[in-house]
Amino acid sequence: MRPNVGFYAGEINALIKNTEEMGEKLHPSYEEIRTAIDEKKELDSERVSEIHELFAEGTKFYQLNLEKIKLLKPPAKVMGNHKKFEKAYTEYVAGCQEMTDSLVPEVNVEAFDAAEQKQDNATDVIYKTIQKITNLLLK
């Protein structure tokens, strides 16, 4: 049975939309940590713990999205790009987990920065690959 292009496109669209929405939810807390690091300010350990919990929740959400991505049946013409997307999303989730881990028992600036870079790199690949997939599906 051939993969359903419309279903695949809809699922990819929903996954990206959900990822962006979670990112928007987590962004203010990320900014709080980033600002504290940049301004060399101490954050209250209770607040860091709250952010850690929030990030852990987000990482679990991204992990569920990754499981959905792995179950999708891409059309043949986007198979290679789908694999690239899956790999980049896996890296993104790993970066999110590393950032979450960087907050316990206190903020590890080096680990936080490395996780941020890993997420940025993965995000770039995700969006470039999604653009390619979209273009191929529209042909």
Image (cartoon, rainbow, N blue to C red):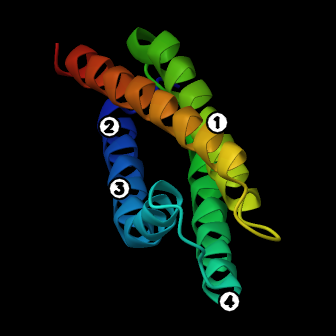
Could you tell me residue 92's position as x and y percent? 57, 40
CA gap between label 4 and label 2 equals 42 Å
Foreground tag (4 vs 2): 4
Horizontal side of residue 134 vs 112, given as left or right: left
- Looking at marks 4 and 2 on the same chain, the residue that comes earlier in the sequence is marked by 2
Residue drawn at the location 41% of the way across and 60% of the way down: 23
Q: Secondary structure at mark 4?
A: helix
Q: Which residue is mark 1?
A: 90
Residue drawn at the location 45% of the way across and 61% of the way down: 39
Q: Quadrant of residue 62?
A: bottom right
Q: Which mark is residue 20?
A: 3
CA gap between label 4 and label 1 equals 30 Å
Q: Amino acid at mark 4?
A: Glu
**Residue in the foreground of this view, choosing between 43 and 115:** 43
Q: Which residue is mark 4?
A: 46
Could you tell me residue 59's position as x and y percent? 63, 60
Categorize mark 4 by other alpha carbons within 10 Å: few (<14), some (14-19), many (20+): few
Residue drawn at the location 76% of the way across and 58% of the way down: 101
Q: Secondary structure at mark 2?
A: helix
Foreground tag (2 vs 3): 3
- Looking at marks 3 and 1 on the same chain, the residue that comes earlier in the sequence is marked by 3
Could you tell me residue 102's position as x and y percent? 73, 56
CA gap between label 3 and label 1 equals 16 Å
CA gap between label 3 and label 4 equals 27 Å
Q: Secondary structure at mark 3?
A: helix
Query: Seen from this angle, which residue lies furthest bottom?
Result: 46
Foreground tag (2 vs 1): 1
- Above or below residue 28? Residue 87 is above
